[in-house]
Each structure stands twice: as C-alpha cells, then as structure tokens.
Image (tube, rainbow, N blue to C red):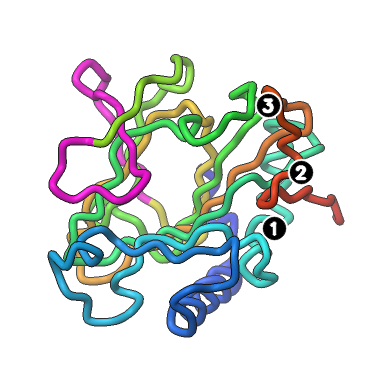
Amino acid sequence: MLPDLISKADIDTYEKRFITIIESADHPDPPMKIMRDIMFVKKAVTAQSRIGEVNKLVNFENDEIMFRYTTQTKLVRAVQELIGKEIYSIATNLFNKPPGIDGRHPLHQDLRYFRIRPPGGIIGTWTSIGSATRKSGCLAVIPGSHRGPLKPHSNPAWEHVNTGFYGIDVSELSEHIYVETNPGDTILFHPLLIHGSGRNRTDTFRRALSSHYASGKCWQPGKNWKSADRVRYIVETF
C-alpha cells in the first residue's frame, strides 16, 4: 500500500465529479455506465437518493476530470516501476458502496475479466475516497495468492449478487486479511491476487477509485488489444 498517494484536493475533485455525473444523467455518454445495485434493481429496498442506488461508475476514460486519476504522476510512476515504462489504461471504475444494503464483492481474481496476457504485465490500483474500514467494507486480500493460478469463478450462492461479481470457491483457501485505508491511500495489486470486500455496516458511503493498466509488451490471442475502445495509452508528460 502507498499511503496518501493521491492528495485530498484531488480526491475531493473526483468525488464531486462523480456525484455530478450521477445526479445529472441516468445514462451518461458511452462507454461510461452507471451500475445500480441489484437490491434496488429488484426493488428489495428503496434508496433515499439517486446516488444511494449506485454500485459503481465504469468506463470514465472519456471524462476529462475523472480520467485525471488514471494519469496522476505518482500513480503512473508506481505502476511503471512494476510493469515498465510503456503502459496502457485498460479499465476504470469508481466503486460506490452505499450503507444499508448487502453490497458484498466475493473473493475473486481480476484476471477473470481480462484476456490480455501475461498476468505479470497487468496491475490494478485502488485508491480510497474517504476512509475504508472493516466495518465499511474495506478490501480483504489473501497474501501470496497472486503466485497461484487463475481459479474457476462463478456466481456465489447469495440472495443478492451484483452483475459481474463472480467469486471463487474459498473452502480450501488461507484466511484473508483486511486492508483498512485512509483517504488517498492506494493499493497496487497483481491480477491473480485473491481479494474482495464485505458489507458496508456504517451510515456513510464507502467509495474508491480504480484503474487497471497493462504493459505494452502484453498480448491477446487473435486481437490487437491496444486498439480497443476503452484502452488509452498513458503518455509520460513528467
């Protein structure tokens, strides 16, 4: 973890922009999408506000303000130290975990969502907006699990599971640890690292920004992944 990597001023800017997007548009311009929590989709609960229904905002590559997170100097340099100078952004998310709902994200590996290889050429970042504690649903990880293979993923047998929140069989896994964070603290993790998050048992939102990057040396069978709509070359301007 890199403490206080992103400044409070920048964190506030991204959070305000996120709130503006949610309050101003049910369907923002593609590829950006607003994902509503399954409990509100199925009318299991009623939200007190529009933003209280949101599970996450995805694909903010075309939003000038939000994408500044992905190109932050300190963040980019940290990523380059791990996967090399030539890097591309391949996925962007702002996670919004409202209070009063299930909202769990089962233990999983991010490589499940990517066809780019090798795994060592991909890295994910997760920056806390506000504080993330065990009570509010901070990240839980299994140390050393990135050294293992990509495991089978499926929908967990829960009553409420958000779309695309696949999980792995945890019956034979080592115990996970909780990574509590303060605003601006940033976690960098391998795509095979097993991680997830629990319910938010507080009365405030737990939010985090996330980007995934891939080395220019990565490849994808039968496809030029660098030309995909959501992929952005990260130009080194510092």
Given the image, on which type of amino acid does mark 1 rest?
Gln
Numbered circle sitting on residue 72: 1
Residue drawn at point x = 21 percent, y = 71 percent: 203
Question: What residue did someone put label 2 on?
Answer: 227
| Extreme residue in the front direction | 222
- Are the residues tagged 1 and 2 within 8 Å (C-beta)? no
* Residue 149 position (above or below residue 137): above
Mark 2: secondary structure: helix
Question: Residue 227 at x, y = what percent?
Answer: 76, 43
Mark 1: secondary structure: loop
Residue drawn at point x = 59 percent, y = 24 percent: 119
Question: Residue 46 at x, y = what percent?
Answer: 17, 75
Cα separation between marks 2 and 3: 12 Å
Given the image, on which type of amino acid does mark 2 rest?
Ser
Between marks 1 and 2 in the image, the one whose residue lies nearer the viewer: 2
Given the image, on which type of amino acid does mark 3 rest?
Gln
* Mark 1 Cα-neighbour bin, 10 Å: few <14, some 14–19, many ≥20: few
The answer to which image quadrant residue 105 occupies is top left
Mark 3: secondary structure: loop
201 drawn magenta: no
Numbered circle sitting on residue 220: 3
